[in-house]
Image: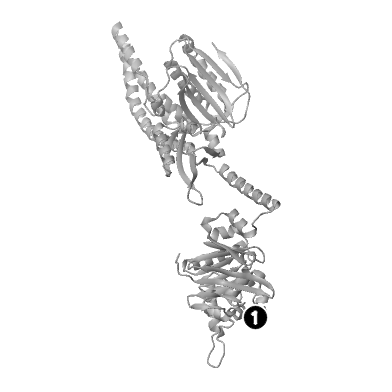
């Protein structure tokens, strides 16, 4: 802001008879400044601006403008010196048109004294078009509605491009829509280096738009201060009273309390997790999204250590360093515990004087977005593998069938026992290859599955029945917990049975004699959750993300193709479900989530 003054008022006094209205008031206005005048009723604000505009002549003091010093101004002289004003009282002549009121005293005339009406109408039309305004300029202003009458007064004040614009309580006369228009004009004038004197009783408006404020009380200038050095309550106290009454103090505290509650409610309902630290890094506020993410800890139990316990140590070190050094920091796709992926952002915030007030931590839960991207990645991967699988399966099956036919012919023609045994072994291996290619074909045809309403319990029971002999032979303790009534879903029983068989076989292969397998089906909200768990050696955390990849296997036997889990996942995806795995607490669990059609109770079955 330029230090050259557009206006300086020095020692101005004025009285209405024996009633003294101003006592040696002084302030200045800088280029590009919005300077607010505030004060209680009869503080002298309107009197002061009328003296500046020439509507009143000061008894004592001087007005200093770039053109010189003046003991007093007339309205015509003030306009000539670039001072425009909009007063609280209407200053229009109702019987005259907008053009008459705007150009009154400034008409251009032809030789002979004839007013150049067409020129003024054309000029004012172009001026209004630039401002996107449209109303009848030729009608008497008394026939316009009140809002347009006030607008005419404002246009008259700005039309001749004043260097100083004075607005007296203008916001009380316009709707928010018109005030948005006026604010744009004011801010544009400010950018051009004009000065605006703005009188308002609205402290929020003053705090938002003014650069400086001069406070008048009982006709005296109490203080001129930069807005950035004040808060709303300080300005309120200095403007209206040295000492507030108990009632006023209660009201002020009540407003402050409501303002605090309002801000806290906004923060609490933001969908991103927010943790606010005080200047000593203690937790001041935690919103609902953060509480949900940081469960089971409640807001009262939370500490920084508990929050950071779910983040790797290297990232925690970076975050703490940023907090201590008062710097902003952003970490993306950060693992948060075993289940979540987050974006973490921290930023210090300061008070009015620039002192550190605390730190804001934003925790954006990106788990669903991450899972969706992973789902799409796997879908694309499986689609490509499926096309490859179909081609390979068909190419291999044709020569395999030919080989099997010739094997049958050779078996019929040979008489040697040893040759027959070898041929049977070869036939068995060829059949195993055929089974693998059958899995490939099954894998590639999942998209053609017909989905109907069915009971998920039936798929699990059939799978258990088929594997009951293997369970008993291996002496595995098996338990099953399922609802009493049908668990109705939209699916394909044969394919879901195949999934349960694959999961149960994986558990059996992982266990020694005496191991335990648990199977369950239960309702979770509007979904069905089914799971197969075993207490085998578990799966290393580093490879959990790979186990659903095609041909990946942790089994060392040569009979495994590594397609079982990939096929299972593809079947569940075709059912618009989710297949997940986690290994913790001595148990490895494969869980299936599907949409439910109804909600039921549970029962438990123990199968020996």
* The quadrant where residue 44 appears: bottom right
Q: In this view, does 82 lie above or below 371?
A: below
Percent coordinates x, y for residue 5 in the rendering: 48, 70
Q: Name the residue under label 1.
A: 96
* The quadrant where residue 204 appears: bottom right
Q: Is residue 605 above or below residue 77?
A: above
Other residues around mark 1 within 10 Å, as few (<14) / some (14–19) / many (≥20): some
- Residue at image position (61%, 45%) is 261
344 horizontally vs 269: left or right: left
398 horizontally vs 454: left or right: left
The quadrant in which the N terminus is found is bottom left
- Count how many numbered circles sit on residues in the image: 1
Foreground residue among 79 and 267: 79
Q: In this view, does 464 lie above or below 453?
A: above
Percent coordinates x, y for residue 383 in the rendering: 40, 35
Percent coordinates x, y for residue 427 in the rendering: 34, 15
């Amino acid at each position: 802001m330029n230090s050259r003054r557009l206006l300086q008022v020095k020692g101005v006094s004025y009285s209405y008879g024996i009633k003294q209205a101003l006592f040696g008031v002084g302030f200045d206005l800088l280029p590009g400044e919005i300077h607010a005048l505030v004060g209680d009723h009869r503080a002298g604000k309107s009197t002061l601006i009328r003296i500046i505009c020439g509507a009143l002549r000061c008894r004592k003091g001087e007005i200093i403008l770039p053109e010189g010093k003046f003991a007093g101004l007339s309205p015509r002289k003030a306009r000539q010196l670039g001072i425009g004003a909009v007063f609280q009282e209407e200053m229009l002549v109702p019987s005259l048109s907008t053009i008459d009121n705007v150009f009154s005293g400034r008409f251009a005339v032809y030789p002979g004294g004839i007013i150049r009406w067409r020129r003024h109408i054309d000029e004012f039309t172009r001026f209004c078009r630039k401002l996107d305004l449209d109303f009848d300029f030729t009608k008497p202003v008394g026939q316009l509605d009140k809002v347009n009458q006030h607008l005419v007064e404002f246009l008259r004040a700005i039309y001749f491009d004043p260097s100083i614009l004075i607005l007296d309580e203008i916001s009380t006369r316009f709707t928010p829509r018109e005030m948005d228009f006026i604010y744009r004009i004011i801010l544009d004038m400010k950018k051009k280096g004009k000065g605006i004197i703005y009188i308002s009783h609205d402290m929020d408006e003053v705090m938002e738009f003014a650069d400086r404020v001069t406070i008048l009380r009982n006709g005296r200038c109490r203080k001129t201060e930069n807005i950035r050095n004040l808060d709303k309550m300080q300005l309120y106290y200095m403007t209206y009273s040295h000492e507030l009454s108990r009632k006023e103090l209660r009201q002020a505290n009540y407003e402050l309390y409501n303002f605090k509650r309002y801000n806290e409610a906004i923060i609490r309902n933001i969908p991103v997790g927010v943790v606010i630290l005080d200047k000593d890094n203690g937790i001041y506020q935690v919103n609902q999204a953060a509480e949900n993410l940081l469960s089971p800890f409640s807001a009262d139990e939370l500490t920084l250590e508990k929050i950071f316990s779910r983040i790797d140590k290297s990232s925690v070190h970076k975050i703490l360093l940023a907090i201590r050094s008062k710097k902003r920091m952003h970490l993306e796709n950060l693992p948060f515990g075993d289940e979540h992926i987050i974006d973490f952002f921290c930023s210090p915030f300061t008070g009015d004087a620039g002192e550190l007030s605390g730190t804001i931590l934003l925790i954006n839960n990106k788990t669903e977005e991450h899972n969706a991207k992973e789902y799409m990645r796997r879908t694309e991967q499986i689609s490509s593998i499926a096309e490859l699988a179909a081609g390979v399966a068909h190419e291999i099956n044709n020569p395999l069938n030919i080989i099997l036919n010739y094997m049958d012919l050779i078996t019929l023609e040979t008489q040697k026992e040893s040759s027959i045994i070898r041929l049977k072994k070869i036939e068995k291996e060829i059949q195993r290859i055929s089974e693998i290619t059958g899995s490939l074909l099954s894998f590639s045809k999942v998209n053609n599955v017909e989905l109907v309403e069915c009971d998920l319990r039936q798929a699990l029971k059939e799978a258990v029945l088929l594997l009951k002999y293997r369970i008993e032979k291996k002496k595995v303790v098996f338990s099953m917990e399922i609802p009493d009534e049908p668990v109705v879903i939209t699916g394909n029983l044969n394919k879901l049975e195949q999934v349960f068989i694959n999961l149960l076989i994986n558990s059996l292969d992982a266990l020694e004699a005496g191991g335990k397998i648990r199977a369950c089906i239960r309702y979770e909200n509007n979904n069905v959750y089914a799971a197969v768990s075993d207490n085998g050696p578990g799966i290393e955390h580093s490879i959990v993300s790979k186990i659903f990849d095609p041909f990946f296997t942790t089994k060392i036997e040569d009979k495994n193709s590594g397609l079982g889990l990939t096929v299972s996942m593809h079947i569940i995806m075709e059912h618009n479900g989710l297949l997940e795995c986690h290994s913790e607490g001595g148990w490895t669990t494969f869980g299936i989530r599907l949409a439910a059609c109804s909600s039921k109770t549970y029962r438990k079955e123990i199968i020996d």
